[in-house]
Amino acid sequence: MKGTTAERVYHHLVVVADSKREIWLVDDLWHPVQNAVGTLDTHVLRGRYFIELGETGTSDVAYPVELFGDLRLTQGDLEAGPACLRQAPILLDGE
């Protein structure tokens, strides 16, 4: 059966930042998926995500992440890599 939940593969994503730093994981439409303080340790579907560090809305920077397998990142990894401007969530019809 195509499209069943059995076909969904979740990948382990770990993001480690300063112990008091908020970490936000947002999807490719800029909707919040999950947040944590210090360490984000989660399992998510393959795809494009953005990581924001700090309280939501206080930073204009986001770090793109292409998730194709398990991944562990540090705050230093993110800050040394590519960054983009944080966007407002994209609303779909009816939202």
Image (cartoon, rainbow, N blue to C red):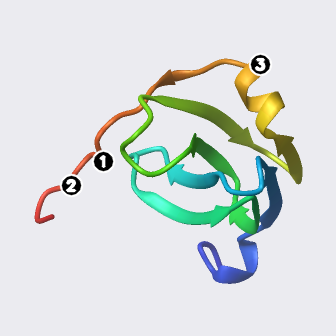
C-alpha span from label 1 to label 2: 10 Å
Task: Decide which of tag 3 and tag 2 comes sooner along the chain.
Answer: 3
Side of 75 relative to 52 (left or right):
right
| Residue that protrudes farthest toward the front in the picture | 20
Judge by depth and name the residue closer to the eye, 74 or 32.
74
Dot 2 lies on which element?
loop
Dot 3 lies on which element?
helix
Q: Nearer the viewer, mark 3 or mark 1?
A: 3
- The residue indicated by pointer 2 is 92
Mark 3 is on which residue type? Answer: Ala
Mark 2 is on which residue type? Answer: Leu
Mark 1 is on which residue type? Answer: Pro
Judge by depth and name the residue closer to the eye, 53 or 82.
53
Q: Do callouts 1 and 2 mark residues in contact (Cβ within 8 Å)?
A: no
Task: Decide which of tag 3 and tag 1 comes sooner along the chain.
Answer: 3
Q: Do callouts 3 and 1 mark residues in contact (Cβ within 8 Å)?
A: no
Q: Which mark is residue 13?
A: none
Dot 1 lies on which element?
loop
In the image, residue 76 sits, relative to residue 89, either above or below, namely above
- The residue indicated by pointer 3 is 80
C-alpha span from label 3 to label 1: 25 Å
- The residue indicated by pointer 1 is 89
Q: Quadrant of residue 36?
A: bottom right
Question: Would you call the spot at circle 3 few (<14 residues within 10 Å), some (14-19), or many (20 or more)?
Answer: few
In the image, residue 31 sits, relative to residue 51, either above or below, namely below
